[in-house]
Image (cartoon, rainbow, N blue to C red):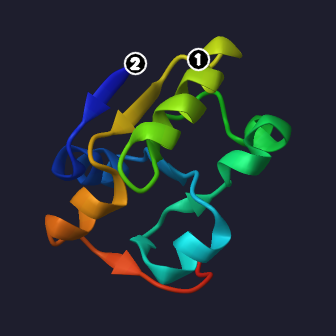
């Protein structure tokens, strides 16, 4: 699976990619990349079909491990345009990119 930096992810989001956060709801509420859609890894097997197959999907978690697992699940189930965000939400925030708190999906 391809991996991209937070800066590159931000550019792709502006071009229509979707950012999918696979952390748990309590983690998401503490801090998340602005615009990220929450589908927790614990629910991912049951919910991944909510995601469009014709959009670029950028997977994000805390540091990159859970999002890589979720992205691989998508690839294994017929999705083709899936990328993992290197360093996850921690790297996104460290790079000064926009973040939110709470449930604002």
Classed neighbour count for the residue bearing mark 1: other residues with Cα under 10 Å, few (<14), some (14–19), many (≥20): some
Say which residue appears at 35% left-offset and 50% top-offset.
Answer: 63
Q: In terms of image quadrants, where is residue 58?
A: top left
Q: Position of residue 80 (x, y in %)?
A: 53, 16
Image position of 67 (left or right of 26):
left
Image position of 77 (left or right of 35):
right
* The one of 46 and 24 positioned closer to us in this rendering: 24
Q: Quadrant of the N terminus?
A: top left
Q: In terms of image quadrants, where is residue 77?
A: top right
Say which residue appears at 58% left-offset and 17% top-offset.
Answer: 75
Earlier in the chain: of badge 2 and badge 1, it is 2
Say if residue 57 shows up in the picture.
no
Quickly name the residue at label 2: 1
Q: In terms of image quadrants, where is residue 34?
A: bottom left
Q: Position of residue 21 (x, y in %)?
A: 53, 55
SS class, disc 2: loop
Q: Number of callouts in the render?
A: 2
The furthest residue to the bottom: 102
Question: In the rendering, which numbered label is found on residue 75?
Answer: 1
* The one of 67 and 103 positioned closer to us in this rendering: 67
Kindly indicate whether the residue at mark 1 contacts the one at mark 2 (C-beta within 8 angstroms).
yes
Q: Position of residue 99 (x, y in %)?
A: 35, 76
* The one of 101 and 15 positioned closer to us in this rendering: 101
Classed neighbour count for the residue bearing mark 2: other residues with Cα under 10 Å, few (<14), some (14–19), many (≥20): few
Say if residue 74 shows up in the picture.
yes
SS class, disc 1: helix
Q: Quadrant of the C terminus?
A: bottom right
């Amino acid at each position: 699976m391809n991996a991209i930096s937070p800066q590159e992810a931000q550019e792709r989001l502006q071009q229509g990619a979707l950012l999918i956060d696979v952390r748990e709801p309590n983690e998401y509420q503490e801090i998340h990349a602005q615009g990220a859609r929450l589908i927790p890894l614990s629910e991912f097997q049951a919910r991944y079909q909510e995601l469009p197959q014709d959009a670029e999907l950028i997977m994000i978690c805390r540091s990159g491990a859970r999002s890589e697992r979720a992205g691989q699940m998508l690839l294994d189930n017929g999705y083709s345009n899936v990328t993992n965000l290197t360093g996850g939400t921690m790297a996104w925030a460290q790079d000064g990119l926009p973040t939110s708190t709470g449930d604002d999906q």
